[in-house]
Image (spheres, rainbow, N blue to C red):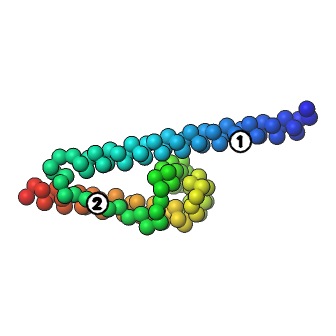
Amino acid sequence: PPPATMGKKREKEEAEEKAAAKKAEKEARKAANKARKEARKATKKGGDDDAGFVFEEKNEANWTDEEQGALNAAIAEFPASMDKKERWKAIAGAVGTRKAKECLVRFKEVKENLMARKVAEEEHRLKVAA
């Protein structure tokens, strides 16, 4: 076959390999998210110190665990040293189901959730210790 045909064939093979790797990574993230979720449930059911402690995380746009895992991986993949617009476009492309603005809003929401959880846990710890 002519060289151009071989190039297209190789491109197709590379695209298939990339898609398979992306699918495997997605499944691994999904399994990890599920394991984390189950671990959190087990922790909440844990000792008496945690009795009555419930923290409701914000998820205004109803991000799935799969989307959150993809967002986490993309944030780690694309460094903050990139141009901000280009970085969030790349992150959105990696997530695949959300726009750049949605990814940025979710990133900020998760950050707020983490800070609020720390405060709530500390308040609960002090309340239980009293």
Q: Earlier in the sequence, mark 2 or mark 1?
A: 1
**Whole-number angstrom distance, CA of label 2 to CA of label 1:** 42 Å
Q: Are marks 2 and 1 in contact (CB under 8 Å)?
A: no
Q: Position of residue 57 (x, y in %)?
A: 35, 61
Image position of 16 with respect to 91: above or below: above
As rendered, which of 80 and 103 lies closer to the eye?
103
Res 1 seen here:
yes
Does the rendering let one see residue 90? no
| Residue bearing mark 1 | 15
Dot 2 falls on a residue whose secondary structure is loop
> Hey, what amino acid is under mark 2?
Phe
Quadrant of the rendered structure where residue 114 is?
A: bottom left
x and y percentages locating residue 64 in the rendered image? 47, 56
Q: Residues within 10 Å of mark 2 (few under 14, many from 20)?
A: few
Image quadrant containing the C terminus: bottom left
**Which residue in the protein does label 2 denote?**
55
- Say which amino acid is labelled 1: Ala
Query: Residue shown at 35%/45% (left/top)?
Result: 38
